[in-house]
Image (spheres, rainbow, N blue to C red):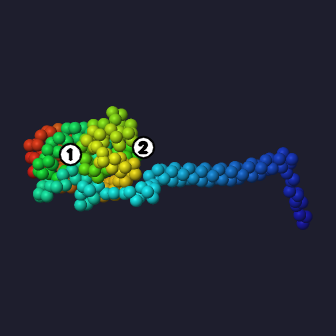
Amino acid sequence: MSGRKVSPPSQPTRREQLRAEREAQLRRSDRRMRIIWLVAAVVVVAIIATVATVVVRNRSAGHRLTDQQLAAQVSPPNLNAAGSAIVENPRTTADVPTITVYLDFQCPACKSFNETYGPVLNQLAGASEIKLEFSILTVIGKRLGNEDASERAGRAAMCADVVGVYPTYHDALFAGQPEQEGAGFTDEQLRVTFANQAGLQNPELAKFQQCYDQRATANALASQQEKALPSFDGSTPQVSINGKNPMVNADGKQVAWWQVLDPSSAAWEQAIAQYK
């Protein structure tokens, strides 16, 4: 029985060879491009990380204290026992409610609060009917990207407490708040203008300005804010009674208790007695 003759496999034509070579070349090109893109991505990520590190380091360097500034650090004498706020009337020893105001000196709503309710709170504090304290924050500066302005104002206010004029300097800061939110305060305003408006004269003025220039309350401000933030609800101003911030109904909305009060001592006394 004769077998069938098997033809040898046909040789690829030149066109098929060219096509195969082209496909192989494209595959090699694709692999090279993937490698190139992978390397480029790694390089970009490395560059971004380097830039971010430099920015963070530069920002940290701007807040870093020199050895001389570290040696000059002081604590405001009228911080409360928890270290979370400055007490306006620290001599009050009676068992009275504590009103705590959380504020940022760049906060427009805080300025409005100070203008509307500041006088009655000062009156009640002066009569030792309440203990009035202020937690100084820098949350507005962080939101606006100019934390330095809130931080410098806070340091200046604490320096004012060091020389015994916190209440009047506090009011001068809010009275001089820029109309444009985020414009911040100048060093001239903080160390001279507001100091003069608070009634400072030498040698207290010189002591205050040295405190400000040396950033002598930087650590105290950072520590006070750290201790105040756990009780802060995230919106300035916040006004608490003995650590509580009760909400009430007003026109179908829930608002903080103080937002429905008249700016009179009778209204505040009644509310404090109710909510304390």
- Please state the horizontal and vertical placement of residue 7, each as a whole percent of the image: 88, 57
Between marks 1 and 2, how big is the CA–CA gap? Answer: 28 Å
The amino acid type, in three-letter code, at marker 2 is: Gly
What numbered label is drawn on residue 256? 1
Q: Are marks 1 and 2 in contact (CB under 8 Å)?
A: no
* Residue occupying the point 14% across, 44% down: 123
Determine crowd level at label 2: few under 14, some 14-19, many 20+ residues with C-alpha closer than 10 A. Answer: few
- The residue that disc 2 covers is 145
Rendering quarter of residue 76: bottom left
**Residue 44, percent from left and from top:** 61, 50
* Residue 180 sits above or below residue 220 on the image: above
Residue drawn where x is 24% and y is 38% of the image: 112
Give me the residue at 34% from left, 35% from top: 178
Residue 160: percent from the left, percent from the top?
Answer: 29, 48
Q: Residues within 10 Å of mark 1 (few under 14, many from 20)?
A: some
Q: Is residue 270 left or right of residue 107?
A: left
Outermost residue on the bottom side: it is 1
Q: Is residue 167 above or below residue 97?
A: above
**Callout 1 amino acid:** Ala
152 or 203: which is nearer to us? Answer: 203
The percent position of residue 115, horizontal first and vertical second, equals: 22, 38
53 on left or right of 158: right
